Image (cartoon, rainbow, N blue to C red):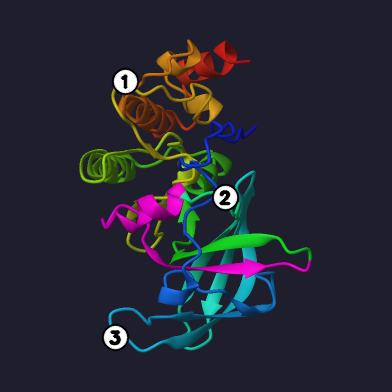
Amino acid sequence: MEHSAPAPEPMLLDEQPPTAVACEKKQQDGEAPYAEGNDAMTGHIISTTIGGKNGEPKQTISYMAERVVGTGSFGIVFQAKCLETGETVAIKKVLQDRRYKNRELQLMRSMIHSNVVSLKHCFFSTTSRDELFLNLVMEYVPETLYRVLKHYSNAKQGMPLIYVKLYTYQLFRGLAYIHTVPGVCHRDVKPQNVLVDPLTHQVKICDFGSAKVLVAGEPNISYICSRYYRAPELIFGATEYTISIDIWSAGCVLAELLLGQVSSFVSFTYFATS
């Protein structure tokens, strides 16, 4: 059974919550425009504008939401097509609390790496109930490591060692980047959050909804990270942890790739937190 990550810690009004919200309301300078037309639902078209900064001309861009590819406590992820270019993208739609900034958006804007999913732009949308949503438009990668593992499991086969090495190398390469350049701790590394291109076998880390820049001496919530991949210090309630919790989680992923199932120490993590 798949377990989602715990809800992030509550934050004060002047702090940045880990999941839901960052793009400040800056429609006037083109940072996060509002969408026109229907809300992002399957089969609906939503239009917004991009550009308009540093003398760049504004242009309208429209997306057709084609299908849902992921859901969770964070919101929903759509596969969508840009009607102007035909490009397929992923749109992550999260509820916008008007009091906060969105940490995920701010972190994604600071990261550019071949093993980290890239953010194209963002926009706001509203519903008939006056709910405000932030939409993160990202590159689309068709598979996840979780589904690749499931494919081999259903076929009663082990993943070829060359793929285990290839995927693991790229996962740790991506983590090395986010840990050092932006200084980000992902806090939810698991197969579901590792995207895989089935043609090129390129791996990209995604879902920075729980991610945070950790500050020495500053306490953090311990009930974080999906249960099967939670590091021992989190199990025992540590609040001043480091990026090493991501390394533990990545080690659990490696063991799962090698064994084709949740490993013994991953099972220990599960039962210790049950």
Amino acid identity at mark 2 = Arg
Q: Position of residue 166 (x, y in %)?
A: 28, 46
Q: Is residue 39 above or below residue 227?
A: below
- Secondary structure, mark 2, is loop
Q: Is residue 20 above or below residue 82?
A: above
Which residue is at 31% across, 85% downward?
Answer: 56
Residue shown at 55% from the left, 26% from the top: 227
Q: Do callouts 2 and 1 mark residues in contact (Cβ within 8 Å)?
A: no
What is the C-alpha distance between the residues marked 3 and 1? 43 Å
**Disc on the earlier residue, 2 or 1:** 2
Crowd class of label 1 (few under 14; some 14 to 19; many from 20; radius 10 Å): few
Mark before the other along the chain sequence, 2 or 3: 3
Can you identify the residue that label 1 sits on?
217
**Which residue is under mark 3?**
55
> Horizontal and vertical percent for residue 44?
69, 77
Disc nearer the start of the sequence (3/1): 3
Nearest the eye: 220 or 5 = 220
**Is-magenta flag for residue 267?**
no
Q: Which residues are magenta?
A: 103-128
**Three-letter code for the amino acid on which mark 1 is drawn:** Gly
The kind of residue on which mark 3 rests is Gly
Q: Measuring 28% from the left and 24% from the top, which residue is drawn there?
A: 216
Is residue 85 found left or right of 272 in the rendered image? Answer: left
The reply to whether discs 2 and 3 touch (Cβ–Cβ < 8 Å) is no
